[in-house]
Every structure is written in structure tokens, then in C-alpha cells.
């Protein structure tokens, strides 16, 4: 089974690298960044001139790109080369409605489609330990699960097409709200003379212990904003959540508060920094 991978960004590059290392058959790849393609080629992947070539040569086509418009553009490009022999897996985080629309187009060609967005960030992508949230029928899920296992250690089917993305948006929205709480209380503790290290230790003893703080407190204390997952990508995800909640008439004030913090970060021009840079926004670095 030949696998094609489209999109070698911060996450996609490492995800594709794991497939190349673990899969026994050919892995094709393409990206507008030819240097990234060359790096994967050095690992054993076969470089393709464009996405159409990936679609033509692959049995399974995986895409991992930033936004809904990118996914739509890819499938407009490759749809003529999709038939009943193909399986398509989009691992991007996009609007669920767009993913369902693409799934319908793919299925109309006789092919199969799954949305499979990921949780966790760059270190987990490198280690092949991502969480993967899947939306597709049960039969397809069992077929693609071994491929997804090249990239992730926690894989769960959430339901039919689009449901993996619904869960991803819920996950990232909750994490943004947890992050906002960490930012506020860690800064309050410091202003009152408690060190970041002691703050983290104390939180770990109680019910407020959380994965985000455990992984990020040292980076926050050292003001390390090196990007593993960008502020602008999380802002995009909160935008998706805002649209979903508006569609069904469900008020989410906590999400709106977190989104307003991210909006400030975007307005301040720090969108390409790591998403933990919201710490600087809450600290007041960009107040007028």
C-alpha cells in the first residue's frame, strides 16, 4: 500500500518522517517548501513534483495543511485523480462543515475519506505519540488505524465524517481556557512573591494539576517563545469554535474570553510565536 503525504509544515514534516521510517512500502510527498521535500527524500521518501502526482501514485493520500481554504484547494487539484481505489485522510484542523463537504466530493468519486486531526504538538509529532481523533465509518477506521499508528499512540474514532474535527475544536478550546487560567494565576503568584517552580509544584499537589502547566511552566518562566504550535493556529481553532457555537446558538463566554486574549496577540504581531506567548498578553505587555 503506497502512501502519499501532502503538507510538510511544523507537524506534517515529522508525521511524514515517521511514516517513511515505519512503512514497508513507498511513501510519496509534496510541499511548496522544496527544502522540506528534500529532507524527507533523504530519509527515503519519493519526492513528487506536485499534489496531483501524489494523488496519482498513492493508494492512501494524507493531507496536513493549516486552513480550510488550503484543504479545499488541494482537493480541487487532486479530485480528478481520485477513484474507488483511493483512501483519503485529511489530518488538518479545519471547519467540520468544510471537511464534510470534501468528504462528499471524495465519496462521489467512489473513494473513502476520513478526517483525523491531531492533538499535542511538535515533540509528540517527532516521537510518533500524537493523539488522533478520527471521523469516518467503522470499517474505514479499522483499515486506516495501522497507518495512523505510525504517527500517534492514542487514536480514537469519534463518529462519522466531521466528528473528529468537532472533538479537536473542543479539545483546543478547552486547552486555551486552561492556558488562560494558568497565565492569570501564575502571574498573580509571581506578583505576590511565589516563584514559577514553586507555583508548579503546589498546583501539582491538588485538583488544578494539568498537562499544559506540567509541560510549559519552565518555558513560561524562561520566556521561551520558540514555536512548537503557533499562536495564530490556536486563534484559527478558536475561530472555528466560535462559528460552531454561533451556528447552534450556544453561548460560550469562556471561549470568547480566551479568543479575546488571542486576538490581542494577533493584533500585537506575535501570531508566529508559540501559543504560550499569550502569557505576555495577559501580563499586559501589549496594553496601550
Image (spheres, helix red, strand yellow):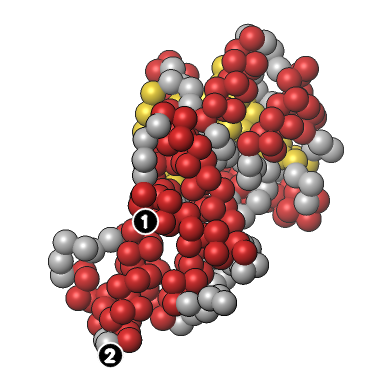
- Where residue 99 appears, as percent x and y from the top left, is 57, 27
Point 58% across, 32% down: residue: 90
Residue sitting farthest toward the front: 288
User: What quarter of the picture does the N terminus occupy?
Assistant: top right
Upstream in sequence: badge 1 or badge 2: 1
Residue 212 sits in quarter: bottom left
- Where residue 124 appears, as percent x and y from the top left, is 46, 55
Point out which mark residue 285 bears.
Answer: none
> Element at badge 1?
helix
Q: Which residue is mark 1?
A: 177
Point 67% across, 48% down: residue: 8
Residue 276 in the image: above or below residue 199: above
> Element at badge 2?
loop
- Where residue 252 appears, as percent x and y from the top left, is 36, 44
Q: Residues within 10 Å of mark 2 (few under 14, many from 20)?
A: few
Point out which mark residue 193 bears.
Answer: 2
Q: Can the viewer see residue 147 in this picture?
A: no
- Where residue 79 appears, as percent x and y from the top left, is 73, 20
Residue 194 in the image: above or below residue 144: below
User: In the picture provided, is 264 more to the left or to the right than 86?
Assistant: left
Separation of residues labelled 1 and 2 (CA atoms): 25 Å
Amino acid at each position: 500500500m503506497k502512501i502519499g503525504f501532502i503538507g510538510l509544515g511544523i507537524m506534517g514534516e515529522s508525521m511524514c518522517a515517521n511514516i517513511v521510517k515505519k512503512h514497508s512500502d513507498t511513501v510519496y510527498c509534496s510541499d511548496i517548501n522544496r527544502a522540506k521535500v528534500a529532507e524527507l527524500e533523504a530519509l527515503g521518501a519519493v519526492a513528487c513534483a506536485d499534489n496531483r502526482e501524489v494523488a496519482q501514485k498513492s493508494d492512501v493520500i494524507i493531507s496536513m495543511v493549516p486552513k480550510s481554504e488550503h484543504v479545499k484547494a488541494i482537493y480541487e487539484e487532486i479530485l480528478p485523480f481520485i477513484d474507488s481505489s483511493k483512501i483519503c485522510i485529511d489530518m488538518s484542523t479545519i471547519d467540520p462543515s468544510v471537511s464534510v463537504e470534501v468528504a462528499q466530493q471524495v465519496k462521489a468519486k467512489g473513494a473513502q475519506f476520513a478526517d483525523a486531526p491531531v492533538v499535542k504538538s511538535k515533540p509528540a509529532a517527532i516521537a510518533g505519540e500524537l493523539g488522533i481523533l478520527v471521523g469516518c465509518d467503522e470499517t474505514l477506521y479499522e483499515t486506516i488505524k495501522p497507518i495512523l499508528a505510525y504517527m500517534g499512540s492514542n487514536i480514537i474514532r469519534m463518529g462519522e465524517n466531521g466528528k473528529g474535527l468537532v472533538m479537536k475544536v473542543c479539545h483546543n478550546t478547552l486547552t486555551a481556557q486552561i492556558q488562560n487560567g494558568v497565565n492569570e494565576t501564575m502571574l498573580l503568584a509571581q506578583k505576590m512573591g511565589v516563584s514559577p517552580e514553586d507555583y508548579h509544584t503546589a498546583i501539582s499537589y491538588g485538583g488544578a494539576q494539568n498537562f499544559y502547566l506540567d509541560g510549559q511552566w519552565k518555558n513560561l518562566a524562561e520566556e521561551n517563545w520558540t514555536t512548537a504550535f503557533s499562536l495564530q493556529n490556536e486563534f484559527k481553532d478558536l475561530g472555528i469554535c466560535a462559528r460552531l457555537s454561533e451556528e447552534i446558538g450556544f453561548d460560550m463566554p469562556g471561549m470568547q474570553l480566551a479568543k479575546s486574549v488571542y486576538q490581542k496577540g494577533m493584533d500585537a504581531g506575535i501570531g508566529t510565536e508559540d501559543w504560550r506567548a499569550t502569557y505576555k498578553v495577559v501580563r499586559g505587555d501589549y496594553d496601550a
